Amino acid sequence: MQQDKKTTHRAIIHLDMDAFYASVEVLDFPELAGLPVIVGGQSDRGVVSAASYAARECGVYSAMSVVVARRLCPEGIFRPGRLERYQEISGQIMAIFRDFTPLVEQISVDEAFLDVTGCERLLGTTKDIAEAIRKRVREEIGLTVSAGLASTKLVAKIASDQNKPDGITVVPLGGEAAFLAPLPIKRLWGVGKKTLPHLELLGVHTIGDLCRFPLEFLEKKFGKQGRHMYFCARGEDRRDVEVVVSEKSIGNESTFSYDLSDLNSIKQELLFLTTKVGERLRRKGYRGSTVTLKIKYYDFKSITRSCTLPQASNDSAEIYAAILRLLPKTEAGKKAVRLAGLSMGKLRTEDTPCQLDLFGGAEKQQRQHLTHAMDEINQRYGSLTIKPGRLTAKTRN
Amino acid sequence: MPIIVNISRDEFLSALASFQNITAKKGTIAILSNVLLEAENDTVQMTCTDLEIGLRHTIPAEVLSPGSITLPSKKLFEIVREAGSDHIHLKEKNNSWVEITIESGNYNVCGMESDEFPHFPEYNNDQLIEIKSSSLIDLVDKTSFSMANDGESQFTLTGILLEKHHRDDTLFLRFISSDGHRLSVMQVNAGEDINLLDIDNRKVIIPKKGIQEIRKFCEISDTISISIEEKQAVFKTNNSILIIRLMNGEFPDYQTLMNIIDREKFIEVNREYILHAFKRMSLFAEDKYNIVQFVLYDNKINLASQSMDIGNAREDISVNYEGDEIKLGFNGKYFIETLSVMKSENIKLFISSNESPCMVISDNDPEFISIIMPMHL
């Protein structure tokens, strides 16, 4: 199998939105165009999650603390993040990508790998395809996206960063090593703060420098990572574009409008959240096996308690039962609670094999039918049209 | 009076060894990690408890001064285990300190006063009936592997259900265990006295730890007296007694489940062969579910498993089968455990669909039934 992968060359496009969050802000608020827009919390405790290119000129980059960013770019326009809006746009963009090939591996909200091997006859050269995608995103969404084209994911990703913003970089087959050689060594995946000084001591400043060292040497010095670097530096990367990138967890939390001390009200809020999380799990076709309850007290101290279900589930009632078992392990009811949340982890898709139960199978099946019917109604008439009786009094937030 | 005794090292050691699982439990009551020693009339009575299980042995000793004391179970066991001599000399000193003398060695261990030790449960001698240890061992060994683990399923499934069962004119004592995915039922013809056992019209469930202790207790003697009282099970030999608190709660209706199995269609296969085939498949089976694919078609069972990291395995076993193809998944471990406790050369597999329970029985294990639920593939 691995031999095959080496011989049949793949055509991979890495697409990376330019300053995505900041660009969406500009898209929604055109008056911000050209200004240094910085997304990432208005309080000084946050970090920058995105900066427009104007802001980057001042030296602001993502993950920098907001305080530092403010100092570097006093005229910067700081916006709180609107994650839901970004996700909405992201969904539209990914849908465009999927019009070209089903082999889309979304690696974050604003970037994805596309495998377009074999599409040439239908859609033209890889470069034509990339340009067509870029054009559609520009025209339909109004945002720019940079593309990197190569035969491996690794090189494609590095390439897309090469001519940002709104650029396209094509690395021809066989030209991977030559393309990588002049780039600074820190651009290589897996080379971080820890490895960098060691490499510099060896006189390695560019990726090309690293290629001079034999595999044995790197393996001896850096272990597994050395082997990884050896192949990466040559642009060799056998990983396929993986269509399904599983989500790690699905959860909901809510900060109450006033702190709750009454256990029943807290339970009601949790039932509401559980109902929502259950619905989301089922809509996305997941089952989760770990249930985590999060409670933040009035004094901002927050704790989590979690348990593992005997079998992965997406049944709201089962999840709520687990939440009720976890709740006594917190001080909710004794201490006022400001926020409650829950999340389901260790997700597996519904079609993962699962062990059937000996007892109670019929009831479980009945409940599944019921849940399914409720989901269908809620999908047509709006979330929580049908809901547990205890939530009828609770108006939707 | 301070206790002073000479005890035979071997008998002392085997009694202490049998306590270790019970006293090892970490709890809030310190004295429960101790063993109670009570000396009088040429015997030492040794007791331990975790409040759910109580175990007591009476061993002969040279009692120089009667009395009682409690000593840390683990430390005492370790000292005696390492002792080279035939005899152990114990002498209580002030403030519950006990001096242990072994040949020329001296060990001072701090004990606790015996009056703080929980009372050993009362039991009724009249209700005891005799049963062969080998029968009890058979019951435990053929069911204990399929008990649920804590938190894995409903609480009562972490124990074993005891029932009487009549077939024709024979009365059986039956043990039933299930972890919610598989069920093991084993029964033995243990004599007419079983009739006297008070387990009718109620769910008598012995907890997992108790079952483990029963298995060890069976090694003491060839016959054991047992009784089931309202809240406890009593197991007794001449010099030892084990009392286990019963679990409260319901056990799922397993009988209905056994009745729905289609007993017409079955396939027969060599036990050892398919057992080892399952073991080979398990080498490649992934994650905790140990998934082995099982396809039945055209006089063949095709077993297959695969792991993302390692590779895959596939194997055909010839059988007599001429029905529609049935494709299902099983947790390989369930089959391995079931087939390992059976003795027959051949076994019968009752499989009717990929969503219904599969039954495993054999002619040479006539009183054993195993039911395994398949997996959704």
Image (cartoon, rainbow, N blue to C red):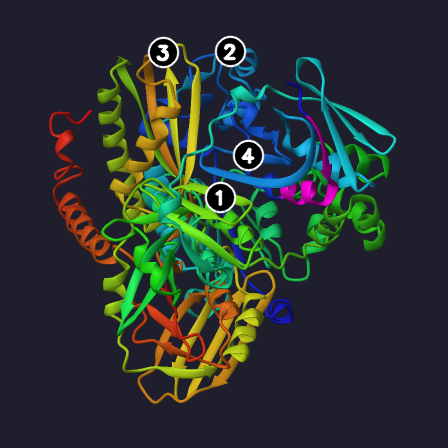
Q: Which quarter of the rendered picture does the N terminus of chain B lie within? A: top right
Percent of width and height locating residue A61: 56, 25
Subunit of label 3: A
Q: Secondary structure at mark 3?
A: loop
User: On residue A298, which mark appears?
Assistant: 3
Q: Which quarter of the rendered picture does the C terminus of chain B lie within? A: bottom left
Residue that mark 4 sits on: B48
What residue sits 81% from the left and 45% below the top? Answer: A209
**Nearer the observer, B217 or A138:** B217
Residue that mark 1 sits on: B242
* In this picture, residue A234 sits left or right of residue A79: right
Subunit of label 2: A
* In this picture, residue A381 sits left or right of residue A214: left
Magenta residues, start to end: B4-17
- Residue B13 on the magenta span: yes
Please tell me whether mark 1 or mark 3 is closer to you in this view.
Answer: 1
